């Protein structure tokens, strides 16, 4: 029996979703672009799914572009806006944060290196929060895009997207010409299951989502693009996805994504508080039974499924391996950084010294997490930490500096 607490890296497939994939793959194998009946049946599956996905976000079907996942959607949003921007007298300016997922951060850094944009990377406060004021301060006459993560995938801290969207709308309403409008993109990958994601309420122009973080399959996701926002395609070829993303549609993946969202919608009212309760039990149990721990990121204003905790004088990788040995899957920071042994860019941006990052563990829960699983983690963790601390060569060295 394994206990899976790494749902921010990916999630298990919901049984209903598996059924949907199998059904679509066997029944609707046609190419949606084909004129014959077999093709048109597949086209119908894609159209239906697009309508359902659009409904979920409060959007129109023409505003949903299916992609291969969150990374591609982030690239399409950012590169699509930049390569489509009108020739300007000054270089376009992009505002983002230092705590973005790498799919956003590396994309903006690359564009900056290529000399195509100027970029500002807003630092969060020590709790990981990004305020509307800190964004507003950075807006320049040549700013064309703001891209901010909705729920941070390492800490679970929530960015006030709605408030920032309102601030940007107000800024836009004071502009002399509407076509110099500042656009707002959010990577909502970690928010879809637990937070409000109605695009009109959030006042976003572009929103990234992916199936495999909400109990759907890997390799399928999407981008909401507000009607009238012009993007340049990043994959060219056929005219699929309103000419914004060439390639034969992943019909089974698309129907599975729609099914996954349907399940989110039908379980939303109960899942949030259930997961939050278990997450709080985990945090409180750790804080009560293990000395010298820090909860990373603000205590309130966080999504219910993530707890990122530093265990001082214990090495993160060693904690992961010890838990894994007992069938418990967790991760350090994000899966992307854990292999490099570099301190997390998110915790570093929050002002953490490397030694606090190294002992940081991300526990991420899902709607399928049970109380018995949390109890098991709380039962074994104190012993593991105690053992690792006893072995730590830095113990005596750090003891004097880490009194908090
Ligand atoms: C997982 C994740 C992504 C990447 O999505 P993929 O579908 O794996 O490409 C992007 N942003 C955030 C916040 C994520 O957690």
Image (tube, grey):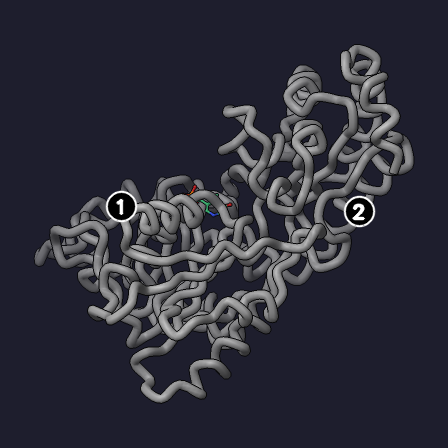
Residue 241 location, quadrant = bottom left
Residue linked to disc 2: 280
Please say whether residue 367 is visible from this viewpoint. no
Q: Which residue is found at the position 86% from the left and 38% from the top?
A: 287
- Residue toward you, 401 or 22: 401
Q: Distance between the residues labelled 2 and 1?
A: 44 Å
- Residue toward you, 218 or 297: 297
- Compared across the picture, whether 402 is left or right of 337 comes to right
x%, y% of residue 3? 67, 29
Q: How crowded is mark 2: few (under 14 residues within 10 Å), some or many (20 or more)?
A: some
Give the structural element (helix, strand or loop) at label 2.
helix
x%, y% of residue 94? 40, 61
User: Of discs 2 and 1, which sits in the foreground?
Assistant: 2
The CB of the residue at mark 2 lies under 8 Å from ligand 1? no
Q: In this view, does 140 lie above or below 1?
A: below
Q: Which residue is found at the position 43% from the left and 63% from the top?
A: 185
Residue 161 location, quadrant = bottom right
Please say whether residue 2 is visible from this viewpoint. yes
Residue linked to disc 1: 27
Q: Which residue is found at the position 30% from the left and 80% from the top?
A: 179
Give the structural element (helix, strand or loop) at label 1.
helix
> Which dot marks residue 87?
none
Q: Which residue is found at the position 53% from the left and 37% from the top?
A: 9
Q: How crowded is mark 1: few (under 14 residues within 10 Å), some or many (20 or more)?
A: few
Q: Is residue 18 above or below residue 195?
A: above
Label located before the other in sequence (2 or 1): 1
Q: In this view, does 171 lie above or below 285?
A: below
């Amino acid at each position: 029996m394994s206990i899976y607490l790494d749902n921010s890296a990916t999630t298990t497939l919901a049984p209903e979703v598996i059924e949907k994939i199998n059904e679509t793959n066997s029944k609707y194998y046609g190419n949606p672009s084909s004129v014959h009946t077999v093709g048109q049946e597949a086209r119908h599956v894609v159209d239906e799914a697009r309508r359902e996905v659009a409904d979920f976000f409060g959007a129109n079907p023409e505003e949903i572009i299916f992609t291969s996942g969150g990374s591609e959607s982030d690239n399409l949003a950012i590169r699509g806006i930049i390569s489509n921007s009108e020739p300007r007298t000054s270089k376009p300016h992009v505002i983002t944060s230092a705590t973005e997922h790498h799919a956003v951060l590396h994309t903006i850094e690359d564009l900056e290196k290529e000399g195509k944009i100027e970029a500002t990377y807003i630092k969060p406060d020590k709790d990981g929060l990004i305020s509307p004021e800190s964004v507003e301060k950075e807006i320049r006459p040549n700013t064309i895009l703001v891209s901010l993560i909705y729920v941070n995938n390492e800490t679970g801290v929530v960015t006030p997207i709605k408030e920032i969207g309102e601030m940007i709308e107000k800024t836009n309403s004071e502009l002399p010409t509407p076509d110099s409008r500042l656009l707002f993109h959010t990577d909502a990958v970690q928010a879809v299951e637990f937070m409000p994601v109605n695009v009109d309420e959030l006042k976003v122009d572009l929103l990234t989502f992916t199936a495999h973080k909400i109990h759907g399959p890997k390799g399928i996701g999407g981008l909401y693009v507000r009607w009238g926002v012009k993007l340049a395609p990043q994959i060219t070829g056929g005219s699929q996805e309103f000419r914004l993303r060439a390639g034969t549609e992943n019909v089974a993946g698309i129907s599975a994504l729609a099914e996954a969202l349907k399940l989110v919608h039908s379980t939303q009212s109960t899942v949030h508080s259930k997961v939050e309760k278990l997450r709080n039990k985990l945090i409180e149990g750790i804080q009560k039974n293990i000395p010298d721990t820090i909860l990373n990121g603000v205590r309130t204003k966080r999504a219910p499924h993530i707890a990122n905790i530093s265990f001082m004088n214990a090495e993160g990788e060693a904690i992961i391996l010890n838990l894994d040995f007992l069938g418990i899957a967790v991760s350090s920071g994000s899966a992307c950084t854990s292999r490099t042994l570099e301190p997390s860019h998110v915790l570093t941006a929050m002002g953490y010294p490397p030694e606090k990052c190294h002992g940081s563990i991300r526990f991420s829960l899902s709607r399928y997490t049970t109380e018995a699983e949390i109890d098991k983690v709380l039962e074994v963790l104190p012993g593991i930490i105690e053992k690792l601390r006893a072995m730590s060569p830095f113990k005596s060295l750090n003891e004097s500096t880490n009194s908090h």
